[in-house]
Amino acid sequence: METIILKPGDLAPDFNAKDQDGNPVSLSDFKGKKLILYFYPKDNTPGCTAEACSLRDGYDELKDLGLEVIGVSPDSEKSHKSFINKYALPFRLIADTNHAIAEKYGVWGEKRMYGKTYLGILRTTFVIDEKGVITHVFNKVDTSEHVKQILEALNK
């Protein structure tokens, strides 16, 4: 499997998937809007919860800048719904159970934990402009300070 490396200036790959309520979501739904598309490994794990809560806590500030937020992980719609309810997340989560979107974005790859190698989501955030062009890529995500990280990059 060849890894795609997307960078600022690249056109964001389109996708079609379902959110936590089974509603269809595609990148083209966001034409004319700015989007934070963040990929995370698993609902209800410490790092992923910290990241989601950081985005939740800074959501109004992001909205004020015209940004929408969408999270993507391999979890099911049901898992996403429970995660949203548990942490009062104000944004949609996409169920990428076959990791097709993650592969298009080059964030499905080899990981290591406890001496074992396996395939999974490489935690990454993309900021996409109104024309569908990637403006920022965060592959060293500070989970508890992610909104601060994004805002600092956007203000440069």
Image: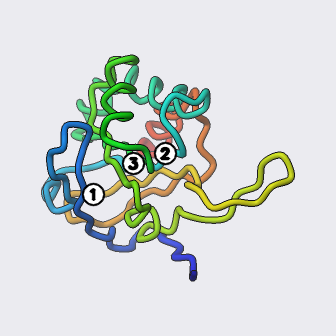
As drawn, the residue found furthest toward the right would be 115
Q: Name the residue tied to disc 2.
A: 153
Relative to 129, residue 100 above or below: below
Name the residue nearer the viewer: 104 or 146.
104
Q: In this rendering, would 53 be left or right of 134?
A: right
* Sooner in the amino-acid sequence: mark 1 or mark 2: 1
Residue 64 percent location from the top left of the image: 23, 30
Mark 3 sits on what residue?
72
- Which of the 4 image quarters holds residue 53? top left
Label 2, residues with CA under 10 Å away: few <14, some 14-19, many ≥20: few
Q: Nearer the viewer, residue 29 or 22?
A: 22
Q: Which residue is mark 1?
A: 129
For the N terminus, the image quarter is bottom right
Residue 155 pos. (x, y %): 43, 41
Q: Residue at x 32, y 57 (%)?
A: 128
Q: How is the image coloured?
A: rainbow
Looking at the image, which is closer to me, 75 or 155?
Answer: 75
